Image (spheres, rainbow, N blue to C red):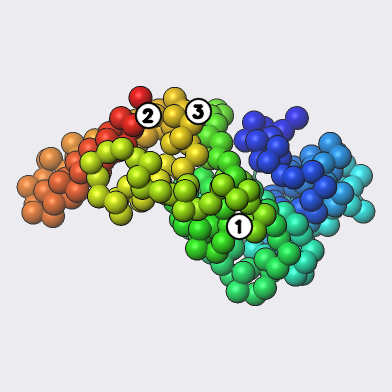
Amino acid sequence: KLSKRLQTIADQVTAGARTADIGSDHALLPVYLLQCGKCPSAIAGELNEGPFQAARRQIAEAGLTKAIEARQGNGLGVLKPGEADTITIAGMGGALMADILESGRLAGKLAGVRELVLQPNVGEEIVRKWLVEHGFVLQDETLLEEDGKMYEVLHALRASDSPKETTNETLYDPGFLAVSLETEQKRNWLYRMGPYLLRQRAELLDNKWRHEIGKLERICKQLEQSDLAESRDKQTQLRQEINAIEEVLSCLR
Ligand code: SAM
């Protein structure tokens, strides 16, 4: 049985898609996608030797060596253009994920890819920005909690495959946030918190960002012990950030 996190990712993959899971580690996700009959074939890409061997073992044990190919290499470098309809990347930071997507795009590896299912551990806003800048449109976002950790799963399609009412312009329309922040700031908060998650007014989103406020407040407390000018500036900046989060969260109620 898959973890709730990996199950949520699997649920977003379109049935019938030839899927490449990049940074696959133990290849649990592609093995599941084949076993449940959702995908006809898959590629498990892995950079590092240990996880690559784990992927090979897992695929062999499941008797799926014909349908799932484990390939060792960096990011989308393991793919030939046109080989995958869907790419999944999970369990790494958003900056690394955006790097992998961008290097792959520059090398032509995204040609033919129609769907991305991404689960950044941190830095979600970097991934959302990359999607917007490269013509992908979010179709949904899921925030889930497992073993005391929160995870975000982002599901995106090419703009040409997106329903015509679902556009980046409407998703990131700063007018949606009825708060007294500047337009650019509103847009930034939409990127940081997620345009769907904000619209869902999820209690979990409120929890996630209250937790973040708690962290920022603890840093402020530590800075109070120092009277260097820089720590005062930093405190002011953190206070502003806390206020902005409070303000955006007030829209959820
Ligand atoms: N995707 C699995 C999941 O979500 O359960 C595994 C996540 S694991 C924390 C991240 C994996 O990505 C590691 O196995 C690591 O070796 C791999 N990785 C890191 N950088 C990579 C890259 N540039 N290309 C391919 N794999 C990479």
**Helix, strand or loop at mark 1:** helix
The disc placed on residue 148 is 3
- Kind of residue at disc 3: Gly
**Helix, strand or loop at mark 3:** loop
Residue depicted at 37% across the width and 34% down the height? 209
Foreground label between 3 and 1: 1
Q: Give the Cα distance between marks 2 and 3.
A: 22 Å
- Figure quadrant of residue 229: bottom left
Q: Residues within 10 Å of mark 2 (few under 14, many from 20)?
A: some
Residue depicted at 72% across the width and 54% down the height? 86
Q: Give the Cα distance between marks 1 and 2.
A: 28 Å
Q: Nearer the viewer, residue 222 or 189?
A: 189
Residue depicted at 22% across the width and 38% down the height? 243
In contact (CB < 8 Å): disc 1 and disc 2: no
Position in image of residue 140 (x %, y %): 58, 41
**Helix, strand or loop at mark 2:** loop
Position in image of residue 96 (x %, y %): 52, 59
Q: Which residue is mark 2?
A: 252
Q: Give the Cα distance between marks 3 and 1.
A: 35 Å
Q: Answer above or below: position of 53 versus 215.
A: below
Position in image of residue 57 (x %, y %): 82, 48
Position in image of residue 45 (x %, y %): 72, 58
Residue depicted at 72% across the width and 44% down the height? 13
The disc placed on residue 159 is 1
- Kind of residue at disc 2: Leu
Is 173 on the left or on the right of 106, as rendered? left
The disc placed on residue 234 is none
